[in-house]
Image (cartoon, grey):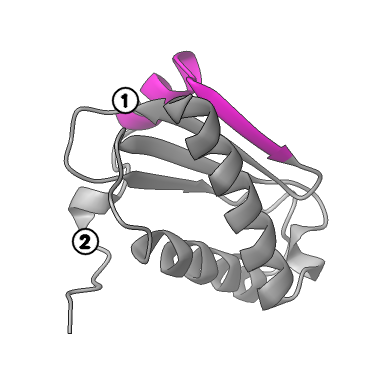
Amino acid sequence: MGDFAFGKDQRLLTAQDYQRVFDQVDAKGSHKHLLLLARRNNLDSHRLGLVIAKKHVRLAVNRNRIKRLLREFFRHQAPTEPCLDIIVLARPGMDRLQQQELTDIVRQQWQKLTHKLCA
């Protein structure tokens, strides 16, 4: 079985990492419950950053559930060319989504991003 850990090499860790993506977005995936921002990187894997604000998702248990589901989705994405730095921003109402709904929305937006960047 493969290693499905979500290590530090797969995360955006510093404010500079986040700022690079915010400043130089290569593609966006937008939905009424979330926003994905992507920027190409020169690494061997995708990196994920999460911005799940208390303003949009009130309860910590819901914020943690959303983060866990998003990490799980990206953990299973095979590194493709180009590798990306991705930031997921929560929007109001995201906490009311069921697990399958959230996964479907993220999958749809992920496909949009990769299609835009590979075209």
For the N terminus, the image quarter is bottom left
* Quadrant of residue 6 within the rendered picture: bottom left
Query: Which mark sits nearer the N-terminus, 2 or 1?
Result: 2
Numbered label attached to residue 16: 1
Residue at 36% of width from left, 36% of height from top?
Answer: 85
Residue at 43% of width from left, 29% of height from top?
Answer: 118
Q: Residue furthest bottom?
A: 1
In the visual, does 107 lie left or right of 97? Answer: left
- Magenta-tinted stretch: 17-30
Name the residue nearer the viewer: 64 or 114: 114
Kind of element beneath mark 1 = helix
Residue 56, given in percent of the width and then of the height, sits at 75, 51
Kind of element beneath mark 2 = loop
Residue 69, given in percent of the width and then of the height, sits at 53, 70
In the visual, does 106 lie left or right of 59? Answer: left
Residue at 25% of width from left, 73% of height from top?
Answer: 4
Three-letter code for the amino acid on which mark 2 is drawn: Gly
Few, some or many C-alpha atoms within 10 Å of disc 2 (few <14, some 14-19, many ≥20)?
Answer: few
Above or below 16: residue 70 = below
In the visual, does 42 lie left or right of 69? Answer: left
User: What residue is pinned by disc 2?
Assistant: 7
Three-letter code for the amino acid on which mark 1 is drawn: Gln
Name the residue nearer the viewer: 58 or 87: 87
Residue 113, given in percent of the width and then of the height, sits at 54, 36
Residue 65, given in percent of the width and then of the height, sits at 58, 73
Q: Nearer the viewer, mark 2 or mark 1?
A: 2
* Quadrant of residue 74 within the rendered picture: bottom left
Above or below 43: residue 76 = below
